[in-house]
Every structure is written in structure tokens, then in C-alpha cells.
Image (tube, helix red, strand yellow):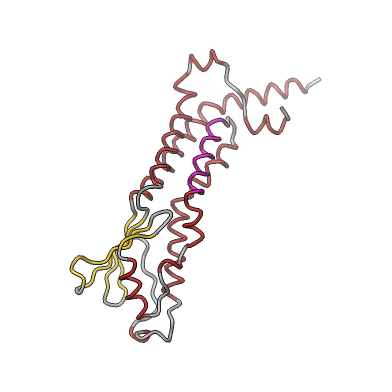
Amino acid sequence: MSPFLEKVIGPRVDQSELEKNSLTYGAPGFLLLIARVLLLVSLFVPFWHMELVAPQYPENLHLIAYVTHLAGDVAEIDSLNHYIGMRPLEEAAQIERSVGVYLLIGFVILLELASWIHSRWTVLLVLPVLLFPAVFLIDLHLWMSYFGQNLDPDAPLSNSIEPFVPPVLGTGMVGQFKTVAMPGLGLILATISSFVILIALFFHWRAYSPLVKAQQEAKKAEAQP
């Protein structure tokens, strides 16, 4: 094994040491397993939900965003948006939705690899997963801002509403509509997964940091004449 690859993978643990301290060395991998399961489950449930409240809709209108597609009253919302000059919702985040499944599966693979790495390189592997919930909301905000700030001036009711940016979380107003946006179960699970990863990193540091230091000291001792 090359020195660089050995440095990336980190020190290995003897079987006898694993048996004596199974909880210490098993905790990081177990927590990363929980994080992987949470991400996989999030694939099948909504990530985000917005409710449009208006008097003419007694049951309100609902927009539900999954990782791969939109659901709910998409057609009705698009028909309303057409009059104020907003583009159809399906035109937003097309690339993100097309790669959503592969992205989350890639995250699961990264977490699997991280469970085998016993060095600080583990942080780089899990970092994309840690940031994913925040990136999802930022991307959603950018798309909503782009759609709401770039209305078609030739639309029938273009003069009845000013450019707007609905909040991605919480309540807001768009013309006569009140919007209520909230995270879906998928985003909640992904966020919990991020917190579990942070806990896993602590246990990872506590288990393997002493071994890395011992390995470095041993190499320094060997290098000395």
C-alpha cells in the first residue's frame, strides 16, 4: 500500500483490540449506518410542502416537492401563475430532480466509505451529506426567487402584482394568497441524518485519533537515525 493511501485509510485495529473495545470502535460505523438508512427513507417521502391559502379555495392549494418530482395541485397553481406571468413549476430544478435519486445514493456510498476510513479524510467524505439539507433550501430559494422576480410583463394580470419571493420556510403573502411553507418528512430525515453524522464524527475522532497519533509517532521514531 502506498504511503498516501495508507495515510488516507488510517490505522487498522487489531481484532483483539476490537473485541475489548467493541463499543468504542463500533459506534462510528453504527451511527453512519443509521444516517444511511435515514437518507434512503427520505427518497420516498416529500421533502417540502407549500400551502396556498385563499378564500376561493376552501381546501387551499398544496404543492409537494419530492427529490424526483412535484405533486399536489401543480396544474391549478400553474394556471394561477400563468395570469401573473410566472413560468410553469415543472420548469424549475429540472436538473436537480433528474439527478436526485443518484445524488442520495451517492451520499449513501460516501457514508459507507467513511465508515472504513480511520483518518481525518472521513470529514471530506461526509461533508456533502452534512451540507445537503442547507443546500436543498438554498437551491429552492434561488429558484423561487428567479421565478418570482422574472414575471412575464405581457401576462394578463402582470400589473396586478409586484415581483415577489415566497419564503421557503414559514408564511408569506403573494397577492391575495397566503403561503405556508414547511419542511417535509424527507428534509427532516436528511437533517436528522446530518446531526447523526456529526455525532458519528465525534465518536470517530475519539476512537481513532489516538491511533493516528501513535502511528505518526512510530513513523517518526523509525525515521530517526
Q: Is residue 143 left or right of residue 52?
A: right
Residue 16 location in percent, x, y? 54, 12
Residue 114 x, y percent position in the rendering: 54, 35
Percent across and percent down for residue 217 are 67, 24
Residue 111 lies in the magenta stretch:
yes
Identify the residue at image location x=33%, y=49%. Answer: 185
Can you say whether 142 is above or below 211 in the image?
below
Residue 73 visible somewhere in the drawing? yes
Residue at the spot 32% in from the left edge and 74% down from the top edge: 174
Region of the chain picked out in magenta, as a range: 102-116
Looking at the image, the residue that sits furthest to the front is: 75
> Would you say the magenta stretch is mainly helix, strand or loop?
helix
Whether residue 127 is in magenta: the answer is no
Relative to 202, 178 lies left or right: left
The residue lying at 35 percent from left, 72 percent from top is 78
Observer able to see residue 170: no
Quadrant occupied by the C terminus: top right
Closer to the camera, 148 or 11? 148
